Image (cartoon, helix red, strand yellow):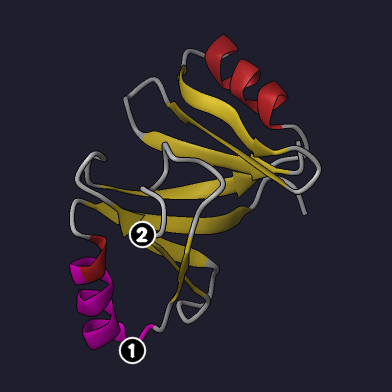
Amino acid sequence: MANQVVHFEIIGSDPAALRAYYRELFGWSYDVGDTVSGQVSEPGQYGFTGDAGLNGGVGGGASLPAKVLFYIGVDDVEAALLRAEELGGRRVFGPDGVPGKLVVGQFTDPEGNLIGVAGPG
């Protein structure tokens, strides 16, 4: 269903330590691999988890700033980013990914909050 929260991310400079922290804190387990975009996490540093009641991931790397964000499921990532800009937001990146499979983008709202959008294209 479009326009619902479909994924969350916790990104930091030491993704292995962050995963260990949330594993100890909440009992989350991870499937470590790659994301669809190097702007989300460095290769091999992203740990997917479904243990939080919502699909999510903990990743990052030394080249990426720390942040927590959520993704809204949309039918068309480019259209969602354009609409966000029309309403006063600012595109951070995207669309990026594998069209037809998973494409992501990020924008900031008028207050500067980072939001992700994800969809098939």
In the displayed structure, would residue 18 be above or below residue 72?
below
Measure the alpha-carbon separation of dots 2 and 1: 19 Å
* Callout 1 crowding tier (Cα within 10 Å): few <14, some 14–19, many ≥20: few
Apparent side of residue 37 relative to residue 95 in the rendered image (left or right): left
Tell me the quadrant of the picture where the N terminus can be found: bottom right
Q: Is residue 26 magenta?
A: yes
Q: Position of residue 50 (x, y in %)?
A: 53, 77
Asked if residue 12 lies in the magenta stretch, the reply is: no
Residue drawn at point x = 56 percent, y = 21 percent: 84
What numbered label is drawn on residue 78?
none
Q: Residue flagged by tag 2: what amino acid is it?
A: Gln
State the residue at coordinates (42%, 43%): 40
Mark whose residue sits in front, 2 or 1: 2
Q: Which residue is mark 2?
A: 45
Rendering quarter of residue 32: bottom left
Amino acid tagged 1:
Gly
Q: Position of residue 6 (x, y in %)?
A: 60, 57
- Outermost front residue: 43
Residue beneath disc 1: 27
Sequence-wise, which precedes: disc 2 or disc 1? Answer: 1
Span of residues in magenta: 17-28
